[in-house]
Structure formats: C-alpha cells, structure tokens
Image (spheres, coloured by chain):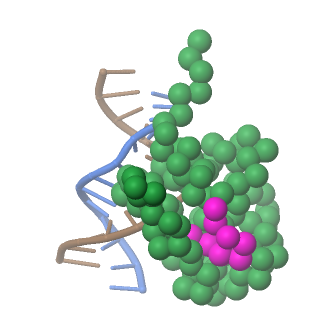
Chain colours: A green, B brown, C blue
Amino acid sequence: MPEETKPDFFERVYEVVAKIPYGRVTSYGAIARYTGTGKSARMVGYALNQSIKSSDSELPCHRVVNRLGQLTGKAYFGEGVMESMLRQENISFTDIDTVDIRKHFWDPMIELPVRSKNH
DNA sequence: CAAGTGACTAGTG
DNA sequence: CCACTAGCCACTT
C-alpha cells in the first residue's frame, strides 16, 4: 500500500512556517516564492491544511494569511480561534478578518538567511 | 482518465 | 474599485 507520498514542497513549506517569529505574519505567496515554486501559493494553503489535520503539527499556521492580511484559513481553526491566537501575539487588525499585514509582515526571502552552497 | 475544487496571486480592462 | 482570467498542482469525484 502506498505510504504518504508527500512532495518535498510540503516539507519545505513546513520548515518555513515553523520559523515565522512570534507576533509576525506572512503570506501564502511569500512562502511559495521562498520555497522556489513561485506561483503555487495555493499549494501552500493545501500543505497547511494537511498539517493541521495531524493535530500535533505544532506549526504556527495561524500566522499565515493571504497577501491582503485576510484570515482566509480561519474556518479550519474553529470559531474565532485564529483571531484569538493572533491577538494573543499583539497583532493588530485593520478589519474584522484582516490583520495589519504592513505592520507585521515577515518575508522569508528577506528575513531568512539564503541557503548558499558555500555556506 | 477527465473534470472539478481550493487556506492564492498577478494581470487586464 | 470590481469582475474576470490564467497559472498553479494535489487531491477528489
């Protein structure tokens, strides 16, 4: 029987998400670009969806929002859970379902050290 | 195997 | 600003 044949892309997404600092948020597209796939922002959300199902993921997937700061994945956390988690981290909101992404945006392309082959 | 779906985004008009 | 399109790709029907 086939085992979990997850693409490496999923694993790379998990690595990046695990490094999002407390009190910061990033976007699906930003993660997609950092992992090298560019336009597959949809798969980032898909990967997180898979991880959240295995409850012991421990990934701060609540810190991932869309490019406008909207909590497009809140439905997968339970009622008001995502908002609560973000507010607990002192993240400010500009609307009912929207965080102030300009203030809290964390771009892995900038903030994470680029993996160079020379190290 | 074809068609539909989705936690997205950038582009066009 | 709004509506629509194309690209993306794993997964479901």
Residue B3 or residue A5, whichever sits in front: A5
C10 lies above or below A37: above
Relative to residue A12, is residue A89 drawn left or right? right
Tell me the quarter of the image containing the C terminus of chain A. bottom left
Q: Is A90 situated above or below A35? A: below
Farthest front residue in view? A118
Quarter location, residue C12: top right
Give the left or right position of residue A74, taking residue A115 as reference.
Answer: right
The answer to whether residue A75 of the structure is visible from this angle is: no
The residue segment tinted magenta is A19-27
Q: Main secondary structure of the magenta part?
A: loop
Seen from the viewer's position, the closer of residues A3 and A100 is A3
Q: Is residue B1 left or right of residue A26?
A: left
| Camera-nearest residue between A115 and A52 | A115
Question: Would you say B9 lies left or right of A55 here?
Answer: left
Work out whether residue A31 can be spotted.
Answer: yes
Q: Position of residue A36 (x, y in %)?
A: 39, 54
Q: Position of residue A89 (x, y in %)?
A: 77, 77
**Is residue A1 one of those drawn in magenta?**
no
In the image, residue A1 lies at what x, y percent?
Answer: 59, 12
